[in-house]
Amino acid sequence: MPKRPGEMELAENCLSQDAWLSFIGHIQTPFKSREMCPRNGRGTDEVAYIKLKPEFLPGVKSLETCSHVIVFYWMHHAMRTLIQQRPKFDTDIHGTFALRSPNRPNPIAISVVELLEIQPDGLKIRYIDCLDGTPLLDIKPYFPHTDAIPDAQVGWFDKATTPDPI
C-alpha cells in the first residue's frame, strides 16, 4: 500500500509476536475490495453474516436477547508498519493510535453492530466495515450504559481541515 506524504513507518523488526489469538470464525460482507468498504460500520446499511466455527457456536447462548453486539476482527489486509498517517479527509499527520485506520501494528478492529438474527452457523448483522472473509476474533454484548460516552471528544477530528462526516 502506498504511503501518503508525511506518513512514517516503524523500524524493521520492531513487531514481536507476544500474544496468542485464535480466529473463532469469519465475517461475510458484500465488500470484495478495500475501495468498496465504508469508512466505518455506520456508513452502510448492508447486511453481513458472522460465520462461527462449530466449536464456538455454544458461545452465542443468550445473545439472542441483545439488540447490538461489539465485534472484534482482524484486518488481515492492513499495512502493519505505519506509525503516523494522514487520513484521506485531513491534511495533517496523526499518530496511528489517534486514528481508527485499519493500518496499525496490531490491526484489531471493532464495530458495534445491530444483531438481526441468530442463525444455525452464526449471526446476521448490520453496520460493519470489513472485507468479505475477514477473520473474527471475538463478540461481546453492547451495554449502552457502560459502552457509550455521549460527550467524548476527538479534538483533532473536530478541527480537521477537510472533515468527512462519520
Image: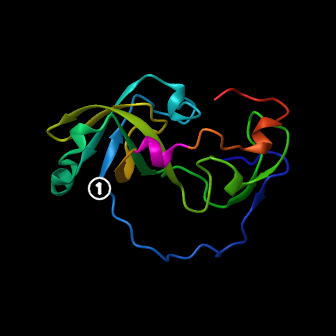
| Residue under pointer 1 | 24
Does 58 appear in magenta? no
Q: Residue at x 40, y 44 (%)?
A: 142
Q: Is residue 83 above or below residue 134?
A: below
Q: Which quadrant would residue 27 be assigned to in this image?
A: top left
Q: Residue at x 21, y 48 (%)?
A: 60
Q: Residue at x 56, y 35 (%)?
A: 40
- The region drawn magenta spans 143-148
Callout 1 amino acid: Ile
Answer left or right for 14 relative to 87.
left
Seen from this angle, which residue lies furthest top? 45
Q: Is residue 113 above or below residue 76?
A: above
- Assess disc 1: are there few (<14), some (14-19) or many (≥20) residues with their C-alpha within 10 Å of its C-alpha: some
Answer left or right for 162 relative to 68.
right
Q: x%, y% of residue 7?
A: 79, 53
Q: Which quadrant would residue 24 be assigned to in this image?
A: bottom left
* Quadrant placement of the C terminus: top right
Q: x%, y% of residue 138?
A: 36, 54
Answer left or right for 77 relative to 26.
right
Does 147 appear in magenta? yes
Q: Which quadrant would residue 56 be assigned to in this image?
A: bottom left
* Label 1 residue SS: loop
- Closer to the camera in the image, 14 or 49: 49
Q: Is residue 99 above or below residue 126?
A: below
Seen from this angle, which residue lies furthest front? 145
Answer left or right for 33 relative to 123.
right
